[in-house]
Every structure is written in structure tokens, then in C-alpha cells.
Image: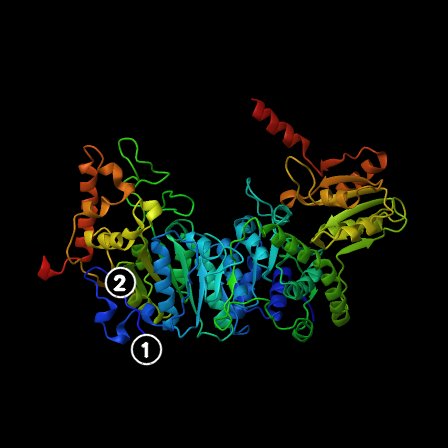
């Protein structure tokens, strides 16, 4: 069996160090390639990477019995310019706001036809998930419909040209929160924490992940697909366009988001956090913020150490809230 | 079997006999009795394996129906008024994707001011969303139209809206012949989707289409919708053979030898026909009523009105800033014919359309004083009081 190896350039465990059964689905020559090459994503797109890993893993976990529902957004646009399609699995796009409800309907259709072997995965960006699609998402959660919903969070409306969403972090520059005035960028004290709100629905499984740890992402997809009912997976996917970062930095930035504590990676069962991905080699938030042009205003001239300090406080709160530092390494 | 039954319950029983597989439901007056009754039948197991989804909004209801239809299930829901408007984006999407969802609209006014009573502002506002629109003149027509709607939707892979006047029909308890299950089974074959989400044969549904092909997609959808009249005629002929109940896209009543024709849509048809009976010997007029509004049966309308000299369209909605809605289509259909067309907007927000008021319209028409566009039964004193308050 031929095996594809990937250099990960970090402390993460590469494929070559793992037993063949534990290697990523991307090393499987028979993988589905759910999101085929040739699509129009930008260079260094975190969402395209995440979607490929999520879907190929979900296809494996369901023995190929998987159907996908997609919200409007980058992923939908770059994958399906008619008459071409990158999708190698059944795929339905309806609207921006309704992917969770459409997915509920698809799941109900299969149940009514006695085809419960077919599973449904819905996916969208942060705008489609935490803003415009949130009512449908919450409805799908509270009814406990048999759908895994995956949010690819790049922290703004990138498809329309980088406008603020409810997932945009404080101080980040977007086209609707420009880096001007006394409080440049996105205001503090706003935004919503979708995974925690998902947990408040007491659904069976909620998890966060980043594209910096693809084994962790795959494990969470596999775990999610082993459960029936509503499930939520929130994946941080850096966006070179919106974040103002080099395409080659995408994976590195995702890792720094996790290692700084700004993006806690954890999983929760029945509304309670059951495991966290511990931070190994913690970095100050500045190390994560500096490579991104959306935060350039924090470091130009005399800089805004006051704002950086407030962002550090958010990271510190996450570390405390989720216990992201293992006792031994404190 | 003919029984004394509420319109909503008769519709629910009929829908049940059409064996829906997924019914997303959200409450809104005056539609609620329909989904309540369907929900009870699902809950009792009578409708197994149908799935009833209590969604969080009408937008979600139509979206879930969309997903269910794309997943190969026969999908049904019902709504009214604000709910229909809240669905708007999904309505266009269902039509664009060519999914045969069937929906009852219990026609109700649109706010503000909020009003729960009957008119056609809701469904008329959605006339261009690409759905077939059928209007029931009474509850007997309503039940039959639902059976036909599923067959029509699935034969053409197009969504169909059955519009039933809120309260006037949905809450009326009267003798209704609900089609027998065996008749419905004979008439309506199991749903075979044109395109379906299936892991064994993956398809991409809902791709992005640019300027290079968008026009063609829209033209093809229009042509598909235009076929609905012929298909409706075929299906209603078959339905009539099975049940003896006759349905027409456009019906004519006492139009022979009458110069004046009142055109109707929905449940006022009966009132207007009664008046035509009363006045048959003294001031005869004809009645032409529309059951199908989209696609607009222009040829049938032209034919029905061929000998008329003055057509008075009684509308249950209007286009603010423009005028009539149905009459605009009638005008287009009759373009080039020397037929006078007047629009009378009647029964907004549940105001009763009385034969007394209609007699006034006919008298004005006979005297040559009927305006090209006007409203029935406007209370001048209320208008004057409101206007004086605005000025003060």
C-alpha cells in the first residue's frame, strides 16, 4: 500500500511516526477526495483544507453513506462554478441562512424512507453559522435532528470582501470595522461564542478544532459521526485574504491561535467540556497577532499595547476557563 | 365520503391521503388547524413513516421542505400572511431548484397594520416566485386541488401553492366530500424524484451559475412552469373521471350573451355567482373565475372573455402605487381587444364582500361611472376623520 507523507513542521505527530491505522485519511489512496482539486479557493485557504479533511473523514466514518448540505459562502462559490463541481459526494446548496434547516429536512427524508444509514453533514462559514443562519442552527440543535453541523470560522464575511461578523474578534480590522479612530477595528465586548451556545442546547457533542492539528480534527469528525442527533464542530480556518497573512502562514497562524489561548480547542459531551487540547509551548498573543495585517494598527508606530493587553486578557481567561495549561507544565 | 367538517380538517385529511413523507410545520393563523391535524395523524402513527418537524420559523419550514424534497421525500407544509413573506427567499429557491413541494396558503392580509383576516395580499405578493398558484373557490375545490397539486408538482418537478381563503374557507364547517384514500392512491403515483441526493449517485444541486448560463436556466424554468396549464388540464380530467368532481383553470358562468363580466378569484366566486343568478332576468352579467393564477392561463382568459364588452376584475389584493394585480395580467391577455377593463379591490383584511356592494358596482358600470381602478365599500367618514387628524 502506497502511503502519502506530509511534513507538518511542528510538534504535531506526522504520518510517518504513526501506525498505518492511525494515519490521516488523506494518506489513504482510496479516500473519497470529497472536495476535488481544481476548485477556485485562494492560495492558502484554510477553509478548503478543513473541508477536505472533514468530509473525507466523515465519508470514511459513514462507509460512504454521506450527504452534504452547504450554506452560501466561499466554500460554495469556489467549489461550484457551473458547469463544474469539485464535489465527489451528494451536495446540496440552498441559501445563506438555511443550511441547518435544509439538513434537518434531508435527514427527515432519509428517515421517512427507511434509509437511516445515510448521514447528513451541513457546513457553512462563520457568517452563515453564527449570524444569518443562527436561528435555523439553534432550531436544529433543540430538536436534536440527526445532523453534524460544521462551521468553518475565518472570523469575518470573506466571500463578500471581509466584513465583520459575530465571530470577528475584538480589534480586528475588517471592511466594516476599519482600523481608524480611538478604538480601531472590531469593538471589544461584542461577538458570540457559538460552541458555548451550542453546548447550552445540551446536544450530545460539541467540539472545536483548528487546521493546525488535522489528526485532532479527524478524530473529532469520527467521534461526531459515531453519535446520532445534533452535533456541532467549530473549526478555526485562517484566511490569507481577510487576515492579511501570507498563504504559507495559514497553518502556522491556526497553531498560534491555539497556542496563544485565543482559540481554545476542546470537546464537550451533553453540554459539559470533557477534554481539551492542552497548550504546549504557550505564546503571548502578540506572536499570533503580528503576522496579520488585520492587526497591523496595533503595532504601527508607538503601537497600542493597551489593546494588545486586553486581547491577552481574553487569552488568559480562556486558559483559565478551559484549563488549557496542563498542571505539570504550569 | 361526504361529511360535515371544517375546511382545514378536510384539507389535512386530504393531504394525509396523499401520503406526505415530511411535513415541517410552523403555526400561523389562520393556517394552524391544518398542520395541527396533520401533526396529530403523524403522532398517532396513522401517517407512518411520515416525519413531522416542528421548526422554529416559516423560513425554516420551507427550507426543511426543500431539503426533504431534495432527499427524495414528498414534502408538504402550510402557511399564511407574514409566514409566507418570511419564506420568500426559500420559495424562490425551491422553484429555482425545481423541487415539487406542495404548500397550502390560508390567505390572509399582510401588516402593518397587523390583521389576521382574509385577503390575497400574501400569495399575490409571491406571484413571481416561480410556483404554480392555484386558488380554491370553495372547500370542495380546495380538497381536490390538493390531490391534483401533488400530481402536478411531481409530474413537472415544480412547487405548487394551493391558496385557500383564510377563515372564510379554512374555518368554515360544511359538507365536504374528502377524496377516499383508494381514489387518491389511484390518482397519485408514489413520488419519483427527478434528481435526488444519493450516495450511490452523487449529484451537485444548487451550483453557482454565472452570466454565461443564467439566462438559459431561467428561460427553461419559465418554459417548465408554462407547461403547468396543460398538465393541470390533463390531471383534472383524470380526477374528474375518478371522482366526478370537475375543476377548470378558468371557469365561465352565465357568460353567454352577457356584455358585462365580473372576474373573480377565490371564495368570493360563489357570492358573485349567486348574484348573477339573482340578476339573470333583470341585469344579467357573467362570471369568469380563475383557479390557476400562475402560470397565467392567458389563452383561456382570452377565450372566456371573447364576447365581453366590459370586464370588472374583483381583486382581493392590489399593488400599492400601481393598481390591480390580477387585472394587470387580464389587460395583458386582452391587449388589442376593444374590451373595457375595470379593477375593483374588494374585501381587504377580511371586510365582507356583500352582494349589496356588488350591485352598486354593477349599477355604476351600467351608468358608465365605474372608475378604472377603485375600492369596494370604502368608508368615507373614516377616511375623512383620519385625513383631518393627519392635517391637524
Q: Chain of mark 1?
A: A
Q: Nearer the viewer, residue A85 or B292?
A: A85
Residue identified by numbered label 1: A1
Kindly give the residue lying farthest to the front in the view shown.
Answer: A2
Q: Nearer the viewer, residue B372 or B141?
A: B372
Quarter placement of the N terminus of chain A: bottom left
Model colouring: rainbow
Q: Secondary structure at mark 1?
A: loop
Residue A167 visible to the viewer: no
Mark sitting on residue B322: none
Decide: few, some or many residues near mark 2? Use Cα within 10 Å; few <14, some 14-19, many ≥20: many
Residue at the (37%, 67%) spot, across then down:
A56
- Coordinates of residue A123 in the picture (x, y in percent): 40, 59
- Coordinates of residue B8 in the picture (x, y in percent): 61, 60
Quarter placement of the C terminus of chain A: bottom left
Does label 1 or label 2 sit earlier along the sequence? 1
Residue at the (36%, 45%) spot, across then down:
A165
- Coordinates of residue B59 in the picture (x, y in percent): 50, 53
For the residues labelled 1 and 2, say whether their Cβ atoms are less than 8 Å apart: no
Mark sitting on residue A267: 2
Q: Secondary structure at mark 2?
A: strand
* Distance from the alpha carbon under mark 1 to that under mark 2: 33 Å
Is residue A242 rendered to the left or right of residue B142?
left
In the image, residue B58 sits, relative to residue B199, either above or below, namely: above
Q: Chain of mark 2?
A: A
Residue at the (54%, 58%) spot, across then down:
A83
Kindly give the residue lying farthest to the top in the view shown.
Answer: B392
Amino acid at each position: 500500500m502506497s502511503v502519502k507523507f506530509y511534513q507538518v513542521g511542528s510538534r504535531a505527530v506526522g504520518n510517518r511516526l504513526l501506525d498505518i491505522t492511525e494515519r490521516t485519511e488523506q494518506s489513504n489512496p482510496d479516500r473519497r477526495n470529497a472536495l476535488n482539486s481544481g476548485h477556485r479557493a485562494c492560495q492558502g485557504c484554510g477553509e478548503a483544507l478543513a473541508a477536505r479533511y472533514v468530509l473525507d473523514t466523515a465519508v470514511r466514518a459513514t462507509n460512504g453513506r454521506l450527504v452534504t448540505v452547504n450554506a452560501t459562502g466561499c466554500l460554495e462559490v469556489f467549489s461550484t462554478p457551473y458547469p463544474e463541481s469539485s464535489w465527489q459526494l451528494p451536495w446540496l446548496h440552498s441559501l445563506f441562512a438555511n443550511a441547518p434547516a435544509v439538513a434537518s429536512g434531508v435527514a427527515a427524508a432519509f428517515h421517512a424512507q427507511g434509509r437511516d444509514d445515510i448521514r447528513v453533514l451541513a457546513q457553512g462559514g462563520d457568517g452563515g453559522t453564527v449570524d444569518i443562519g443562527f436561528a435555523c442552527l439553534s432550531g436544529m440543535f433543540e430538536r436534536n435532528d440527526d445532523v453534524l453541523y460544521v462551521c468553518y470560522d475565518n472570523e469575518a464575511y470573506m466571500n463578500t470582501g471581509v466584513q465583520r461578523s459575530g465571530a470577528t474578534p475584538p480589534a480586528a480590522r475588517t471592511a466594516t470595522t476599519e482600523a481608524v479612530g480611538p478604538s480601531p477595528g472590531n469593538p471589544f465586548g461584542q461577538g458570540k461564542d457559538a460552541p458555548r451556545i451550542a453546548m447550552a442546547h445540551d446536544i450530545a457533542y460539541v467540539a472545536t478544532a483548528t487546521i493546525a492539528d488535522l489528526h485532532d480534527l479527524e478524530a473529532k469528525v469520527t467521534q461526531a459521526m459515531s453519535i446520532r442527533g445534533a452535533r456541532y464542530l467549530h473549526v478555526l480556518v485562517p484566511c490569507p485574504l481577510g487576515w492579511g497573512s501570507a498563504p504559507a502562514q495559514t497553518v502556522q497562524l491556526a497553531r498560534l491561535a491555539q497556542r496563544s489561548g485565543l482559540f481554545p480547542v476542546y470537546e464537550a459531551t451533553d453540554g459539559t467540556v470533557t477534554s481539551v487540547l492542552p497548550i504546549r509551548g504557550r505564546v503571548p498573543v502578540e506572536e499570533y497577532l503580528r503576522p496579520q495585517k488585520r492587526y497591523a494598527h496595533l503595532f504601527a508606530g508607538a503601537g497600542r499595547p493597551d489593546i494588545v493587553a486586553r486581547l491577552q486578557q481574553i487569552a488568559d481567561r480562556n486558559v483559565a476557563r478551559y484549563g488549557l495549561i496542563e498542571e505539570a507544565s504550569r | 365520503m361526504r361529511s360535515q367538517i371544517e375546511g382545514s380538517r378536510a384539507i389535512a385529511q386530504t393531504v394525509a391521503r396523499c401520503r406526505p413523507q415530511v411535513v415541517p410545520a410552523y403555526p400561523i393563523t389562520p393556517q394552524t388547524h391544518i398542520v395541527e391535524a396533520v401533526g396529530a395523524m403523524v403522532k398517532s402513527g396513522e401517517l407512518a413513516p411520515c416525519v413531522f418537524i416542528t421548526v422554529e420559523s416559516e423560513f425554516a419550514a420551507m427550507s426543511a421542505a426543500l431539503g426533504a424534497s431534495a432527499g427524495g421525500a414528498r414534502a408538504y407544509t402550510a402557511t399564511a400572511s407574514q409566514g409566507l413573506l418570511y419564506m420568500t427567499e426559500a420559495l424562490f429557491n425551491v422553484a429555482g431548484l425545481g423541487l415539487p413541494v406542495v404548500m397550502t396558503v390560508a390567505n390572509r392580509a399582510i401588516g402593518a397594520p397587523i390583521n389576521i383576516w382574509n385577503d390575497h395580499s400574501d400569495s399575490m405578493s409571491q406571484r413571481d416566485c416561480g410556483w404554480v398558484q392555484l386558488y380554491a373557490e370553495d372547500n370542495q375545490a380546495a380538497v381536490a386541488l390538493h390531490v391534483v397539486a401533488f400530481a402536478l408538482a411531481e409530474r413537472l418537478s415544480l412547487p405548487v401553492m394551493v391558496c385557500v381563503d383564510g377563515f372564510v374557507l379554512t374555518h368554515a364547517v360544511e359538507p365536504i366530500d374528502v377524496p377516499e384514500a383508494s381514489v387518491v392512491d389511484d390518482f397519485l403515483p408514489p413520488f419519483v424524484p427527478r434528481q435526488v441526493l444519493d450516495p450511490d449517485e452523487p449529484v451537485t444541486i444548487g451550483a453557482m451559475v454565472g452570466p454565461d448560463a443564467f439566462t438559459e436556466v431561467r428561460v427553461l424554468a419559465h418554459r417548465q412552469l408554462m407547461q403547468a396549464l396543460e398538465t393541470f388540464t390533463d390531471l383534472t380530467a383524470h380526477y374528474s373521471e375518478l371522482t366526478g368532481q370537475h375543476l377548470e383553470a378558468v371557469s365561465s358562468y352565465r357568460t353567454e350573451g352577457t356584455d358585462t363580466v365580473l372576474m373573480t378569484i377565490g371564495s368570493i366566486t360563489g357570492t358573485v355567482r349567486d348574484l348573477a343568478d339573482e340578476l339573470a332576468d333583470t341585469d344579467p352579467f357573467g362570471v369568469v373565475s380563475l383557479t390557476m393564477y400562475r402560470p397565467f392561463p392567458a389563452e383561456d382568459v382570452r377565450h372566456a372573455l371573447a364576447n365581453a364588452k366590459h370586464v370588472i376584475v374583483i381583486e382581493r389584493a392590489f399593488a400599492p402605487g400601481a393598481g390591480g394585480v390580477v387585472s394587470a395580467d387580464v389587460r395583458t391577455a386582452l391587449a388589442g381587444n376593444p374590451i373595457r377593463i375595470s379593477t375593483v379591490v374588494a374585501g381587504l383584511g377580511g371586510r365582507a364582500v356583500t352582494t349589496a356592494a356588488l350591485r352598486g358596482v354593477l349599477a355604476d358600470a351600467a351608468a358608465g361611472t365605474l372608475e378604472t381602478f377603485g375600492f369596494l365599500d370604502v368608508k368615507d367618514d373614516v377616511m375623512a376623520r383620519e385625513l383631518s387628524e393627519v392635517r391637524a
